[in-house]
Image: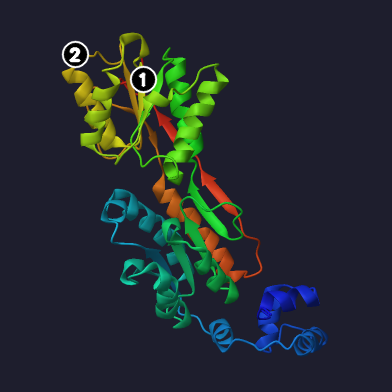
Amino acid sequence: MSKITINDIAKAAGVAKSTVSKVLNDAASISEETKRKVRDIMKEMNYTPSSIATQLARKSSFNVGLLVDLSRKDDFLNHFFYAIIGGIESVIGKHQYELTICNASSDTDDENASSGFMNRLVRSGKVDGLIMDSSIWTAETERLLAELQFPYVLIGDAPAAVTYSAVDIDNENGGQLLAQHLISQGYTRIAFIGGEGCGEPLFDRRVRGCAAALQEHGLALDPRHVLVGTANEANGRLFMSQLLTLPAEEQPDAVICMNNYTAFGALEAARAAGISLPSQLGIATFDDYPLAPYTYPPLTCLQMDTFELGVQAAHMLMTRISEPSAAAEQRLIPAALITRASTVR
């Protein structure tokens, strides 16, 4: 038989989980009648309160943890990471909270990763809430945090059917925006290059958006025009070169790139092949940083507001800390299209 949790007690009593927590702490704000009702149900269901949950409810460190895997240096030691930090700080500082960056990679294996940061940060009371990169999320993480009713928010692509708060850039809509722009300029054979391929959420969402825009205009994404691999300059050159080896009538007339580095490589390969941009070929990319404005020609791109990503994550966490019974929510931040000479005919 599974262990009875606060959730079970709240459901049986017809009250919020936060009310059960307050009953456990004998909060003066809860009426004696409600306390009596909840305690009677606890006895009936043989519920044993978690001493950890009780301790967490009684103390506050006024600290928020940003949990990331710093072993993935390309993801986190860059402009986007610091923009997210700035966004978080701009919100939590007004609430007198401090930000602590917590390295999940110090928990060396997947099996113990959740228990590692749970002990270091949550059970120790070092932080009052977590903002967590979605790549760290596991079903076990969700179970442990839910059991303690510990407030947290995911940044990034959230798993399906989430029951917690999460925020991300709207990457699917971003793919649509880029493809729609290219179609409006007269391009009809659009390729997508870079990214780890099917199964990687970021890649899947961006390609799905691109394909949806093409379908709306009676066009299709040719599987031969989707080339996957690490999104870097070398692969940008390689993939562009491979596309140019197709028969002339089968070559793409526009390419959407996973990031700036892929786009720069593709641009160089097209130039080496004597291809004229944008008359013969259009190249567009996700993200404005770091190269898009400075290439020749400058690259059409999507501006991804990662500062706002941090702002929204922090607002959501502050709500969950102050209102534990608040409903979970998922937010998507729209990307903005910046058109430049690489695609505008």
Q: Amino acid at mark 2?
A: Gly
Horizontal relation, residue 134 to residue 320: left or right: left
Rounded to the nearest angstrom, the CA distance separating label 1 from label 2 is: 15 Å
Nearer to the camera, 208 or 78: 208
Q: Is residue 97 visible?
A: no
Q: Is residue 204 above or below residue 238?
A: below
Give the image location of residue 206, x and y in percent. Answer: 45, 36
Check disc 1 and report its element: helix, strand or loop: strand
Image quadrant for the N terminus? bottom right
Nearer to the camera, 49 or 249: 249
Q: Mark 2 sits on what residue?
A: 274
Give the image location of residue 52, x and y in percent. Answer: 54, 85
Q: What residue is rendered at 54% in x and 66% in y? A: 142
Q: Is residue 76 above or below residue 43?
A: above
Whether pointer 1 and pointer 2 mark residues with C-beta atoms closer than 8 Å, the reply is no
Q: What residue is rendered at 45% in x and 63% in y? A: 131
Q: What residue is rendered at 57% in x and 89% in y? A: 51
Q: Mark 1 sits on what residue?
A: 254
Q: Quadrant of residue 345?
A: top left
Horizontal relation, residue 244 to residue 67: left or right: left
Q: Is residue 93 above or below residue 37?
A: above
Nearer to the camera, 13 or 22: 13
Q: What residue is rendered at 48% in x and 23% in y? A: 180
Q: Amino acid at mark 1?
A: Ala
Give the image location of residue 229, x and y in percent. Answer: 31, 39
First in sequence, mark 1 or 2: give its number: 1
Give the image location of residue 158, x and y in percent. Answer: 51, 53
Check disc 2 and report its element: helix, strand or loop: loop
Q: Is residue 228 visible?
A: yes
Rate crowding at label 2 as few (under 14), some (14 to 19) or many (20 or more) other CA atoms within 10 Å: few
What colour scheme has been applied to the protein in the rendered image? rainbow
Rate crowding at label 1 as few (under 14), some (14 to 19) or many (20 or more) other CA atoms within 10 Å: many
